[in-house]
Amino acid sequence: MKKLFLAAALSALTFSAAQAADAVVYEPVSEAPIAASFDWTGAYIGAHVGYGWADVDRLAITGIANSYDANGFLAGVHIGYNHQIDQFVVGIEGDIEWADLDGDDNGFGGTVDETDFNWTGSVRARLGYAFDRLLVYGTGGIAFASIDQNNIGGVPESIKKTYTGWTVGAGAEYAFTDNLTTRIEYRYSDFGTKYFAPAGLNSFENDITSHSVRLGISYRF
């Protein structure tokens, strides 16, 4: 009788333990939320400062040629729009800036030939690759510049012309908040050739190219 009672008690304990095990609820392990990547899509406006150095190649109708530099500071504003597709960012940007690049040929050929930049501007496409908040990009498009050509000595004359050419460059931009970004950019610009015929002086043409580095800040809408 005792054996029968012990067997029944053991069976009851085994059944209760099995039910208790089934009653344990296993909660799924929650994973930490993945932070969303920064989205570069949207319009922006900003300001920048920089430094430029231009090379002025002068060729006179007499065949005399010389070159000199025109260097100085830049400051302006820019506006643009970006659209992000996966990690790629495409956009368009325009800028205009006051320019203080100037230089002369130190009287080569008997008169002083002086070049002064008044302002420059551009309309460019941008193509970049985003590493979350860091955007590395290339840019290129149309460039403009208003330039004074001064002839000092002999028959002084100042001629202002607007040059049209092209520009290419590269840069990096970082979003340190959701709305504010900072950038550094290098550009090479070729403003083409202009023909000059100063009164009383030999006719000549100028070919002007420039390099520039800019630091900027932008506000994203």
Image: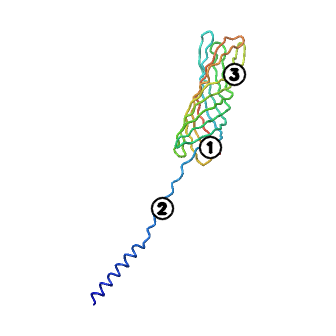
Query: Which mark is on residue 161?
Result: 3
Q: Is residue 66 shown above or below 171?
A: above
Q: CA distance from mark 3 to mark 2?
A: 68 Å
Q: Are circles 3 and 2 on residues that touch, CB within 8 Å?
A: no
> 205 or 36, which is in the foreground?
36
Q: Identify the residue at image location x=30%, y=87%.
A: 5
Residue furthest out toward the bottom: 1
> 21 or 167, which is in the foreground?
21
Q: Identify the residue at image location x=63%, y=10%.
A: 61
Query: Which mark is on residue 42?
Result: 1
SS assignment at label 1: strand
Pointer 2 residue: 30
Q: For the N terminus, which image quadrant?
A: bottom left
Q: Position of residue 205 (x, y in %)?
A: 63, 16
Within 10 Å of the Cα at label 1, are there few (<14), some (14-19), or many (20+) other Cα atoms? few
Q: CA distance from mark 2 to mark 1?
A: 34 Å
Q: Amino acid at mark 2?
A: Ser
Q: Position of residue 59 (x, y in %)?
A: 61, 14
Q: CA distance from mark 1 to mark 3?
A: 36 Å
SS assignment at label 3: strand
Mark closest to the chain's N terminus, 2 or 1: 2
